[in-house]
Amino acid sequence: MEQFIRDLIGNDLLATIVWCVLPLVFILGYAIVAILAEMKSASWFQDRLGPMRTGPWGIFQPFADILKLLMKEDIVPARADKILFNLAPFIVFVGAYAAFAVLPFASDYVGADLNLGLFYLIAVSSFGVLGIIMGGWASNNKYSLLGAMRSAAQIVSYEVPSATALLIVAMMVGSLNLQDIITAQSGGFWNWFILGGPKSDVVLASGAMLHADIGNFVFLPLLLATFVIYYLSALAETNRTPFDIPEGESELVGGYHTEYSGMKFGMFFMAEYANMFLVSAVAAVVFFGGWQSPWGITLGEALDIPVLTLLEGVFWTAAKGFFFVFVMMWLRWTLPRLRVDQLMYMCWKVLIPVSFALALVVGFIVVIR
Amino acid sequence: MELTDIIFYIFALVTVGSAMIVVFSRNLVYSAFSLMFTFLGIAGLYVLLLADFLAVTQLMIYVGGILVLMIFGVMLTHRVVNVEISSGAMRVIPATIVVGVFLGTLLLVLTRTNWMVMEKSPDIIGTTSMIGTALVTDYLLPFEVGGVVLLVAIVAAAFMARKR
């Protein structure tokens, strides 16, 4: 894939820039679909029609909204800290976008095939926290600051169970490389980690051999619980309902981005949508086989057409990612918002002890087998 | 000049430049936030030294943990609604002496050390498993002692926080 782009463009530097911008193109396209999906699904869950006037069936509503954001006046509050106020939206988006560098979209389309992919992914998410605090503080508004504080406390707390849950799978594969984790689940949906991981020996992307047998079914309940822990923590890390306390409208106006308008608000918005897809895609990669098809074989490989294999990989990554993004929207209109103390109780007294216990049990079984 | 050289100088510039803002800025919050770029630059330098695990750990621990904690500290110990949080200069003479001695020691170490330069970079692909193996074999005791010390610190912090 990388070689293909180099051949197509002919200039190494330009090709590298194109290679770096490809996920951004994906995010922009995805954001337009996701905005419409959010509005439409919200309406249907509430037995409404949703946007119907902008184009047939309202499908041009996201374009109208983005155009509105671009045209809006950019207001900086007089008493705000100008430098940090302007910098914060970009830091938040960089934090979200940096993680896309290691996300494998297909077997030969991953920005950087790092051996530390999973660890890097957990680490760069901390930039988002700093950007949120920066924006909240620089706005010089007590609601913004309170929202930023809540958000930071929430993200820092929920990083622990989500990282532990991902570590459990990394322990079973013996690698932090995301391509290794995906290839460990090859051969069909019964080999996915949500169903206990591989049931026979597999060769990983790095060439190492992972020994496994039918006895891996003992991991099924453990990994199901792990997935639930990861997904709940992911919801909290992206500030989505029922964990959207940082922007609780009834208490805080709008949270850390209360004072932002125009495209700077748009950047926060894009970062939130990018993060939603990111955590969903990570769930898909780690627990649901990533770019692998549910039945283990691809049409492209069967017919020996590499381009088709690539497209199928991107399709499955996007499909699985979109499914979990949809579940997030579904939960948003189903569950009420938690209180701050309930949120912290959930993290420190439920998710963290359970995830540590799971890590111990899975690690013990992996070692003795 | 090769690409790695250019990248090295970019990271070095980011590290030193932001470190200077950390030191010279009158605004504590600016100092705290530019520390983020210092840590980022250092992580980049680690990557160029083939210490990939150390680089990501640097981001994880310092940017994600310690820096967030420091910023919380800065914001919660001052009047949070006031943007003008500043740090002034005080005790200039003792500080100059301490910094001078420290700088002298560093320069001495820098010039006296016999730096070993490798002819070519070693082919190491990933240091994670090497670090992991070393931690549970040769360095097991320091590793466990470090863990116990951290546990004691957590228990002590929880105890102090609960004290009415």
Image: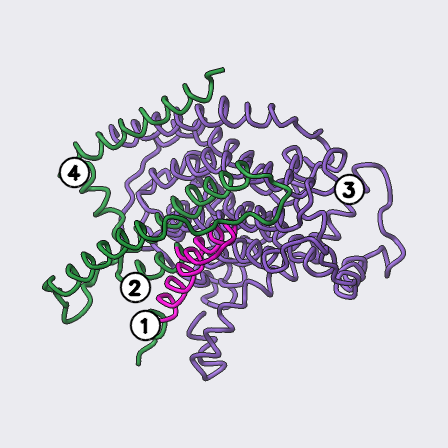
Between B6 and A56, the one lying in front of the other is B6
Q: Which picture quadrant has residue A45?
A: top right
Q: Quadrant of the N terminus of chain A?
A: bottom left
Work out whether residue A291 or residue A266 is closer to the camera in this orientation and state it.
Answer: A266
The numbered dot on residue B4 is 1
- Give the residue displayed 20% in from the left and 63% down from the top: B123
Is disc 4 in contact with disc 2, using a CB cutoff of under 8 Å? no
**Chain drawn green, letter?**
B
Span highlighted in magenta in the image: B9-38
Q: Is residue A4 above or below residue A214?
A: below
The quarter of the picture where the C terminus of chain A appears is top left
Residue A212 placement (x, y as % from top left): 31, 38
Q: Which residue is mark 4?
A: B139
Residue on which disc 3 sits: A42
Q: Are marks 1 and 2 in contact (CB under 8 Å)?
A: yes
Q: For the residue marked with disc 1, what is the amino acid?
A: Thr
Near-viewer residue (A196 or A3): A3
Instruction: Identify the secondary structure beneath mark 3.
Output: helix
